[in-house]
């Protein structure tokens, strides 16, 4: 029998998270701080709208790019929250989560051999998506001393004449870093100068705790025409299981992405789309409440880690904290495994998000304060025992 | 009327759900000094924005029995005092947990908590109905409390998320 498999798929490494998941699942009554999704239920009025749409028998395909009503609401929302102007008819499409949008954007824009810049540590799917598109992933290692922001210098140092695309993953999973306006301005200038396109993954846009609201690179002069903005409902509205995201891009790019979506997916789930309309129309208040709650827990954790002497830069985005564990003389994986075995607390090794995550662990605060307190006590015990 | 600043709103948001929280922890959660929090709270207490720190008790989970009733009350408003004077006569009874002036088919809604059904009926027949201005009452007994003060009383929800997700 011939090898049934494709070389490019064989080259892809399985997700480092998967491996750790298997270990944690075995462990009974462990406290997990390992999730990448909100602890809130989807707001009831949103769920109820989904149910209502089912009752009314709205169970058919929608148009490929999504319900017109939803696209209009997305355009309104982006205008209202982030001062982004997109034409709902030609520049917005609804996808199956933000992850589909990432895949589509990369596949629509990258030719074999072209280089894609991926700042890391970051979400696990960028690199394999580039590989699947026969592109060449070029990792930009973000540094703790820069609070894991992408700097102009780091960007310039990795640009070659083959560079086509930059992935911009802020607010960032796993570091919690954000990219403030002043950094974005510098990055934007480089992109325009060097004629580089940007896929800006803004799925955590609402979860930004810095003074100013989240700023999108698409807002910078000359950037809208070279940026694909990825966003969705999972994090902001606690709708992970509904699998619903969206993409905003210039028509020239979006129409090509839509082709792939059309053939691979057809359309995003109809029930989810009806629920999402309700979320955008009447959900602003829910988002504020959840964000305030995350921010309180964030402050609580930062404070607790400071008291314990666990080094950590202050993250202003998403719902992660990324403490430095180098002083314990263990690798991230050793640290996470020991913490799990000895104190039954599950965190994710930084290396699951790229080799440069070595020396860090990702701690999620998408948990109730009571739960966090319980876990913190155990982490404190662990740290005291292993302090050098 | 007190102006509700962002900080006051946030303080109220937290303590409305958890009045047990101490000032130290509140100051960490909101990123504001303890002194400032303490000042704001005492100001809101003085202005009667914060009227008390009660505990939500589900008596159904105890061996003790409580009977809760909601009584619709129709009254004849009095010259000069309107409804206020009658309301006062009703709310001074310690068994009255709450009383609201309502729009619609009746005037007051009275929330009552007693040990027995007989006590409720005694209150209605002997104390409430005998007030001169009261024209009529309709008593409804609470059979089961599902949600009270924004808290769902019936179920403990488990975390159904996978333990590790990207």
Image (cartoon, coloured by chain):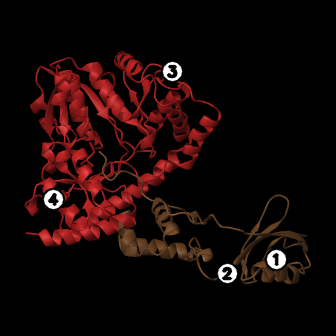
Chain colours: A red, B brown
The residue singled out by tag 4 in the image is A335
Q: Is residue A236 above or below residue A222?
A: below
Between A341 and B35, the one lying in front of the other is A341
**Mark pair 4, 2: CA separation:** 52 Å
The residue singled out by tag 3 in the image is A63
* Image point (40%, 69%), residue name: B26
Quarter of the image with the N terminus of chain A in it: top left
Q: Can you tell which mark lies on residue A35?
A: none
**Residue B123 spot, x, y in % from top left:** 82, 82
Q: Are both tags, 4 and 2, on one chain? A: no
For marks 2 and 1, give the one nearer the viewer: 2
Q: Residue furthest front?
A: A1
Chain letter of the residue beneath label 2 in the structure image: B
The residue singled out by tag 2 in the image is B65
How many numbered discs? 4
Decide if residue A333 is in sight here: yes
**Mark pair 2, 1: CA separation:** 32 Å
**Mark pair 3, 2: CA separation:** 58 Å
**Residue A279 spot, x, y in % from top left:** 52, 41
Q: Which of the 4 image quadrants contains residue A213?
A: top left
Decide if residue A307 is in sight here: no
Of the numbered discs 3 and 4, the one sitting upstream in the chain is: 3
Which structural element holds mark 4?
A: helix
In the image, is A142 to the left or to the right of B91?
Answer: left
For marks 1 and 3, give the one nearer the viewer: 3
For marks 3 and 4, give the one nearer the viewer: 4
For marks 1 and 4, give the one nearer the viewer: 4
**Residue A261 spot, x, y in % from top left:** 39, 22
Q: Can you tell which mark lies on residue B85?
A: 1
Of the numbered discs 2 and 1, the one sitting upstream in the chain is: 2
Q: Are both tags, 3 and 4, on one chain? A: yes
């Amino acid at each position: 029998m011939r090898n049934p498999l494709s070389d490019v798929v064989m080259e892809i490494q399985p997700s480092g998270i998967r491996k750790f998941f298997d270990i944690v699942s075995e462990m009974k009554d462990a406290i997990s701080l390992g999730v990448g999704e909100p602890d809130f239920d989807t707001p009831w009025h949103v769920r109820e709208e989904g149910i209502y749409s089912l009752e009314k028998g709205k169970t058919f395909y929608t148009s490929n790019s999504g319900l017109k009503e939803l696209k209009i609401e997305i355009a309104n929302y982006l205008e209202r929250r982030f001062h982004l102007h997109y034409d709902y008819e030609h520049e917005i499409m609804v996808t199956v989560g933000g992850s589909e949008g990432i895949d589509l954007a990369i596949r629509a824009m990258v030719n074999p051999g072209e280089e894609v810049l991926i700042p890391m540590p970051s979400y696990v799917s960028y690199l394999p998506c580039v590989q699947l598109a026969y592109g060449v992933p070029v990792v930009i290692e973000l540094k703790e001393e820069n609070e894991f922001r992408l700097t102009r210098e780091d960007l310039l140092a990795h640009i070659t004449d083959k560079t086509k695309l930059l992935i911009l993953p802020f607010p960032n999973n796993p570091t919690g870093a954000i990219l403030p306006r002043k950094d974005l301005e510098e990055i934007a200038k480089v992109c325009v100068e060097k004629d580089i396109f940007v896929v800006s993954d803004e799925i955590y846009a609402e979860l930004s705790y810095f003074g100013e609201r989240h700023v999108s690179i698409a807002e910078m002069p000359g950037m809208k025409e070279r940026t694909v903005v990825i966003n969705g409902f999972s994090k902001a509205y606690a709708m992970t299981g509904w699998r619903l995201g969206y993409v905003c891009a210039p028509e020239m790019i979006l129409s090509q992405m839509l082709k792939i979506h059309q053939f691979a997916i057809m359309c995003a789930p109809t029930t989810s789309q009806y629920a999402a309309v309700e979320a955008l129309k009447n959900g602003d208040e829910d988002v504020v409440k959840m964000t305030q709650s995350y921010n309180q827990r964030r402050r609580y954790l930062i404070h607790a880690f400071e008291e314990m002497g666990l080094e950590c830069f202050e993250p202003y985005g998403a719902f992660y904290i990324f403490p430095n564990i180098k002083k314990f003389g263990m690798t991230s994986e050793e640290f996470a495994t020991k913490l799990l075995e000895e104190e039954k607390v599950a965190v994710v090794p930084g290396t699951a998000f790229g080799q440069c995550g070595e020396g860090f662990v990702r701690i999620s605060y998408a948990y109730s304060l009571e739960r966090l307190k319980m876990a913190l006590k155990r982490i404190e015990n662990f740290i005291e025992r292993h302090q050098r | 009327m007190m102006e509700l600043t962002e900080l006051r709103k946030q303080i109220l948001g937290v303590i409305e759900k958890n009045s047990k929280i101490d000032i130290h922890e509140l100051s960490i959660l909101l990123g504001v000094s303890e002194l400032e929090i303490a000042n704001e709270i005492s100001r809101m207490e003085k202005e009667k924005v914060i009227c008390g720190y009660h505990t939500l008790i589900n008596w159904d989970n105890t061996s003790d029995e409580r009977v809760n009733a909601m009584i619709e009350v129709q009254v004849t408003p009095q010259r000069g005092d309107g409804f206020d004077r009658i309301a006062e006569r009703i709310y001074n009874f310690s068994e009255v947990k709450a009383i609201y002036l309502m729009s619609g088919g009746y005037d007051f809604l009275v929330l009552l908590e007693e040990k027995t059904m007989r006590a409720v009926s005694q209150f209605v027949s002997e104390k409430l109905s005998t007030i001169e201005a009261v024209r009529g009452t309709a008593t409804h007994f609470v059979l089961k409390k599902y949600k009270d003060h924004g808290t769902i009383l019936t179920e403990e929800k488990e975390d159904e998320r996978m333990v590790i997700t990207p």
